[in-house]
Every structure is written in C-alpha cells, then in structure tokens.
Amino acid sequence: MNMAAQVTAILNQKGGVGKTTTAINLGACLAAEGRRVLVVDMDPQANCTSGLGMAGVDGKTVYDVLVDGAAVGDVVRATGVERMWLVPSTIDLAGAEIELVTAIAREARLREALRPVVEDYDFVLLDTPPSLGLLTLNCLASARWVLIPIQCEYYALQGLAQLGRTVQLVERHLNPGLRLMGVVLTMFDGRTKLSREVADRVREQFGARVFESVIPRTVRLSEAPSYGQPIIVYDPGSKGAEAYIELAKEVMRIGDEAQGAGVAHTGN
C-alpha cells in the first residue's frame, strides 16, 4: 500500500458496550474483505487478546512497547484469521498508567511506536480500556478516527458529553487530525421498546454519523470469544456475522474516501 493505515480508536469510557467485540469482529471482517488489519489490545483486561485465542500470552506485549520501547514488529502475533494480526495485552498493562506518569511525551508513546509499521496495514484498530486515562489518551493521540459503540440499553447516553469533550481536548492539544468516524449501535434487540427508543435517541443526537449497520444482541456473538474466534469464523451465517460484515463495508467506504482525499493518518 502507498498510504498509511486508517488508525481507529474504538472508544467509550463505559464498560460492556461492545468495544472489544467490535475490535475483534470488525477487524476480522475487514481482513475477510482483503484488507490488512492490526488490532492493538490497549485494555489491561486483555479480553481482545483472549477473544482471539491468545489467553496467557508468553513473551512481549503492548506493555513492553509502551514502557520499555519494544518495537511493535517484535510484539505482533498472527491470529487465526488471514491478514489479521494482534499486539497482545496482559494484566501487566495496568501498571503502565502509573509507570508512564513521569515519562517524557507519555501521551505519544503508542503513536511513536506505531510510526514504523503504520504503512504495513490498511487498518489499525485500537481496543481502548473503559476509562479516559493515559492508555486511552495514547490511543486518541495515535488515531485518525474515533469509532464509538453505544449499547441499546438504559444509561447508554450517559457519559457521552464527557467523552465528546475529551475527544475535543485531544484534537485541540495532542492530535489535530482526530475525527469521529461514526457511532455504532450494539446489543440491539428489536423486540424491546427500550432498544428501539435508545436507537432513535442516538440517531437524533448524532444524525448521519450513526452507522446504518446495527449490531444485534445474540447468543452466538457472546459465545464466540470463549472459543477464541471472531463471529465470522465461529458462526459465519449468523446475524451477528452479517451485521459486522456490513459494518466493515461502511468503514472501508469511509477509509477509501479518506485515502482518496489524501487525508489518511500518517502518525502526525
């Protein structure tokens, strides 16, 4: 490829909204469409790592990249999905928040680490932790795009104002190129009035920035991580797989349009 990857932070400070599910399954669907994808697990819970079948990682992880300056190329692991790679995480990453407090350019550690490899991929997906701390700031400082999953449940819109302010502050002070790619509705259950009402409110608030693809609440999507597989591998004919395939097509269209306009993220 002749342009840098579309670096996308999958962001919401609330837990349980589908960030990791989206990182894994969007990444796998982009790879299935022929794109080269790197997923970076920036959450100390390491659910993205275990969800791709790498629980109990031996060797270097994203912690070593951020704290010790290890090269991303030495940490990347192949996944069970062709054209999809992972920078894994472990619980050790929880210590990075403290260890980086006194570090020079602490918010730019991930951005600088990704710079040598960003042209090797079409998409880099950053799975952020459920907080707005230093790890998340590293993701936002590295990213071209922000993708926000919002679950179709009560309290879904709580905290979005704070999230928006954080993105604006990062854009102003750390990363002028940061943009909202879109909001994706997750855990949607069309049988319930609540899901429909939340979806309507999100579309009222964000308008055209809400993806047309809606991720349903399904048992198969919940089961897939325990088998260490994306949904398109675990159950390719399921509604969850179909939804993420459609989301991947929307994301590719946005990415291709940005590449065509010459505004791909190049690591600042």
Image (cartoon, rainbow, N blue to C red):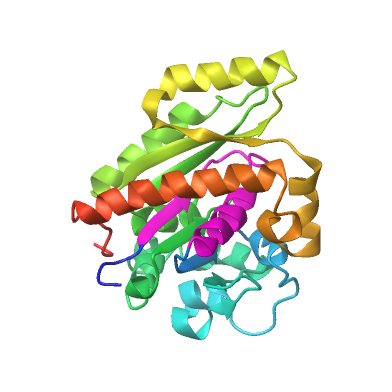
Bounds of the magenta segment: 6-33
Residue 175 in sight = no
Q: Position of residue 25 (x, y in %)?
A: 61, 54
- Where does the image place residue 159, in percent across and percent down from the top left? 53, 29
Q: Quadrant of residue 58?
A: bottom right
Magenta stretch: includes residue 15: yes
117 with respect to 133 (left or right) = left
Among the 4 quarters of the image, the one containing residue 124: bottom left
> Percent x, y for residue 251?
42, 48
| Residue 31 sits above or below residue 179 on the image | below
| Closest to the observer, 138 or 183 | 183
- How many numbered tags mark residues here? 0
Instruction: Give the residue at x 35% y 56%.
Output: 141
- Report x, y in % for residue 18: 63, 43
Q: In the rendered structure, does residue 102 fall within the stretch colored magenta?
A: no
Decide: is 28 above or below 216: below
Examine the rendering and report whether any part of residue 251 can be seen: yes
Classify 263 as above or below 38. above
Q: For this rendering, which residue is in front, 30 or 78?
A: 30
**Residue at the (32%, 38%) spot, across then down:** 168
Q: Residue furthest left?
A: 262
